[in-house]
Image: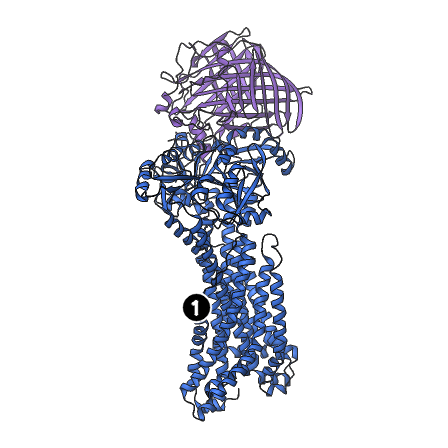
Chain colours: A purple, B blue
Amino acid sequence: MRGRDLGAPRRASVGQRVKIGMAVTLSLLVPTSTPAAQAFRQALPGYRFEFPRDHASHPDFKTEWWYYSGHLRTEDGLRFGYQLTFFRVGVDPSLRGDSRSRWAVRDLHLAHFAVSDLQQRRFIYWERRDRGALGSAGASSETLKMWNGAWTADGKGNTHRLTAAAEGHAIDLTLTATKPPSIHGLSGVSQKAEGAGRASHYYSLTRMATEGTLTVAGKRYGVTGSTWMDHEFGSNQLTPSQVGWDWFALQLDDGTELMLYQLRQTDGSPDPHSSGSLIHPDGRVEHLSLRAFRLEPHEVWQSPKSGGRYPIRWRVWLPERRIDLIVQAAFSDQELDTRGSTQVIYWEGSVTASGTANGRPISGVGYLEMTGYAEPFRQPL
Amino acid sequence: MRIWTVCRLTLVRNVRVNPVRVLVTVAGVAIGVAAFTAVRAANESVLRSFGRAIDVVAGKATLQVSAGELGFDERLLPAVQRVNGVVAAAPIIQSVAPIAGRPGQALLVLGVDLFAEDPFREYRLAGGDRPPRLEDLLGPEAIFVTSAFAGENRLQRGSSLWLLVGSKRQRFVVKGLLASQGLARAYDGNLAILDIATAQVAFDKVGRLDRIDLVTGEQGSLDEIRARLATVLPSHLTVQRPDRRNQQVEKMLRAFRLNLTALSAIALLVALFLVYNAVSLSVLQRRRQIGILRSLGLTRAGVAALFAAEGAALGLVGSLLGVGGGLLLGRALLQSVSQTISALYAYLRVEGIEVAPGLLWFALGLGTAGALAASLAPAYSASRIGPKEAMHLGSFERAWIRRSPLALLLGLLLLVASFLFTRPGPVGGTPLFGYLSLVCLIFGIACFTPQLLRWAGAGLQALCGNWRAPLLRLATGNLSAHVGRNAVAVAAMMAAIAMLVGLTLMIGSFRRTVELWVGQTIRADLIVSPTARYMKGSGARLPDTFVEGASGIGGIAALDPFVGRRVELLGQEALLASGDFEVVARYGNLLFRRGDSATILRRAKVERGVIISESLALAGGLSEGDRLPLSVPSGLVELPIAGVFYDYATDGGKVVMDRTLWAQVWGDDGADVLAIYLAPGSDEATVRQRLEALAGEDAAISFTSSRALKAKVLEIFDSTFVVARALELIAILVAVLGVFNVLWASVLSRRREIGILRSVGATRGQVARIVLEEAGLLGLLVEVLGLLAGLCLSLILIHVINKQSFGWTIQFQFSWWVVIKSSILALGAALLASYLPARRAARMEIPAAVAYEG
């Protein structure tokens, strides 16, 4: 459960000039209750995942994303985080009508690519948007195959190959899943709010052995590491009363992984539908409801660019499972401020975790995503 | 002697003593400089506005792929995107769409993929407007207009906007207003943005693109990237830097602009004659003063400087006024110039007059320096006046008389030079030598005036003696006695009359040629075209269903479907067109340089050849029997040239092929326009009604009878010469001022003589008559010389300047009307200019006049 389609996208304040193309991208990702949304299939309980079929695209749902984030280490011991995401957003079919133009939009394809240099504490990101008119972007509905310009993800069996390049930075990675897909939520749906269809279908490949090359500022490194992959699709999962969210994906060194999200509401309290999963070393998935975990912000960092105040140190506490962790940003400034373009401001970056599990010390790495901190949320008209 | 004291005593005093002359001269310079400034300012504004529009529409693109108005298959885009060095590629649909119900108003419509536009252009919504939603952008009628356009047309979000798109009226809905910055300021805000999918459907370009804009990276130089692109693109596509289009427009308009500039330069030239004249008069009048100054120790150089300064001062003040006036006049011209360009060359909307300060300084400098240069000769002659000679009047005139045969010789030499300059071809597309020839002609004939004045004076005086007409004899005596004073005025007026005669004859011949051409070539009874086509760049076509349906309508003998696309050919913009050669051979007619229309057209059809326009033949050095290289989707072909035809519709050149060849080459068998030939005995109105019914109610299709079309061609023709005619009037105005100056000075300097005449019994009326007669004689001489010079001028304009600039053959056509018109003007102007001087002469008090020691 990640991505831009929660509250984060927002209009510029009144009086400020708005760039058209970008604003349009935003409105795509904003929850709508127009009949347009009804044109798409809803994420309803009882969905039965089937692999490899469900790795591929589901064009009958409105929004879908494949989200890769991971940690890499060069032969010399340099450490990097990376993120590569492919989004697909279906467009109301009535808009294109029976247009004969190849440019009539069926899906809009977005992609984000970011690299965190953990030594230099430098964070850099790029984005792409493409309507995929002449095959320049797309997502196969047969196999796991997404592309947006020259950024690609291609899956065969348990192995995924990722390539992306931008301004002297590039990845060419081969990922091998070491656990079966972990399906989140109950009865095949990850509920996001009260109401039928306010949900998504969501699974993860929580631990993928990673190797390949990473190019940073023109310098190429051989790297190995570990990646987390999320794939989520749904049509209308959010409500306007949700102001933002905090999402954790942690790979712990005892062979377990932890995925937790909390949806924050207007009054500051978490939505009761916030939940998570604990994935055991054998791949067994345990659903965690909001009651099972607590997320306490401990240290706040204020972005000099956006003025947003982000908690960059959290206590992640699962009392019943006797897991108690401190999750700390690898460095503070991993904020994506795209007000110049997509007008989304969010924090997404590499974190480390340390603490105890069942009384024994434990540590790990992960990715944390926080939205809705930079500006007061305003529902687009 | 302190220089300031000298100046105060001479220059400043001159203003008080001769306020009229100073005023008139300054006004003349001001008008000349204003005309020059106005034309340059209007031209410069047009080009700047064009350049900026092209710039902002291109945005950050470093290269553009296009095939002119032909467009190309959109499936080329991925191949372009894959080329090494291409960082971003944006597909563009571009068209000009007239606004329904607002004749003359249009929008430049850009169909873009907004999701791919970030690297290229910025689209910002006007402040306070809410961001559009996806349906706002992608809806089938969604359009974004500039806030400036919306303000003028009272549009807001949600308003309907009806445009003439293709051959129908189409409704769009305004979904947002673009803030007035960057792109939105191009074409004075007459610009709209659509999603590319909407644009493809609306403009009937599904599957096609007009342009691909590229942002390139560091992987090689632009030329290397261009070369790589060329390997993946068919050869009829060009890959150019965006400013190349700018250069193309500049090239296309060069001849048009140069013509106007040259005309305005004549106005300036006439003004400089005026300065020469004024300073000469001043020297003449102040001989005594010069003598005194010289006796007091002022050097020759000092005297020369004094008069040169007078000329420069007149020039400076006149130029200052002229530059200011020129900006105002330029604003008025701009409308006319931009309308002409929109009708003939390319869609244009100009924001207003805008000039580089450099131009204003240049005009100021030109006027002042010109005036200084014009006063050098009189200043020099003033410096030759010794203290003693100064007391003898007439030595100045004697010098002129002595030099007049020399001037005659110089004039002859200039005429020979003028003739020789008509021989060489154009330099870089402009008839440089042609303009030199014009200048030599004017100066050459100007050099004749002193000697001619002497001869005319002597001859007339002899005649008058026989006729016993003492008053006329006095007038003619003045003519030859004051050669120096009169010659310059005659020359100035002659130049103006020559310009009038030359332009009138040229325009008249041109118009007559076009009229004949129209009469012989427009044979179709009815022309059916999308209304939108009156705007350059609309690319509008008739619907295929209409074309098919029309051929089944009763009363029609034949249909000629015409297709025309502007493309780049032989390095210039040209129209690539097709028609049904069999129909044209049988029913129509084209005027070929050599050979019979029907024979050539049939041969072209059989041999799969083309016919080309005269201007293209001249520009490309092509003639009948040569092969025209043409890049088409299947590669480079060389098509035989079956004939070269006269065409006055465009100066960019035209290539026409039969429609079967066109369909094979471009895969297109539609029609932009239909020329309809009626069956014998069928009624135009009935056929028209049937066609209108076929078109349907929403159609924006115009039906033009051949008569109306012919009238329209001539109407466009006339509108393009409005500015030329205005400049012509300005030159005459300046010349009238010159004659006025001379006569005024003449009256002043002859006060004593007039006083004596009055005291020996001449009436006031008789005195006035002498002045009027002198003016009339000057006018007559001006007319004779002006007519002669004008005739030569028109021949140079027709056979050298127009031919080399535009490639048009114009049949010279003499008209007596021009003789009548110019005679009335020359004599009328001279008499008009003499009215005040004559009145002044008549009102002189005898004692004061006799006492005057001029």
Please provide percent x and percent y for residue B689. Answer: 30, 40
The answer to which image quadrant residue B178 occupies is: top left
Please provide percent x and percent y for residue B683. Answer: 31, 43
Q: Closest to the observer: B364 or A276?
A: B364
Q: Is residue B360 visible?
A: no
Give the chain letter at badge 1.
Answer: B
Please provide percent x and percent y for residue B842. Answer: 42, 85
Residue at the limit of the structure toward the bottom, as seen here: B760
The quarter of the image holding the N terminus of chain B is: bottom right
Q: How many marks?
A: 1
Q: Residues within 10 Å of mark 1 (few under 14, many from 20)?
A: few
Please provide percent x and percent y for residue A183. Answer: 48, 11
Q: Closest to the observer: B226 or B369?
A: B226
A263 to A287, vertically: above or below = below
Q: Amino acid at mark 1?
A: Lys
Q: Is residue A175 visible?
A: yes
Q: Closest to the observer: B34 or A223?
A: B34
Q: Would residue B458 appear left or right of B333 to someone viewing this image?
A: right
- Under tag 1, what secondary structure? helix
A338 to B23, vertically: above or below = above
Residue at the limit of the structure toward the right, as seen here: A76
* Mark 1, residue position: B821
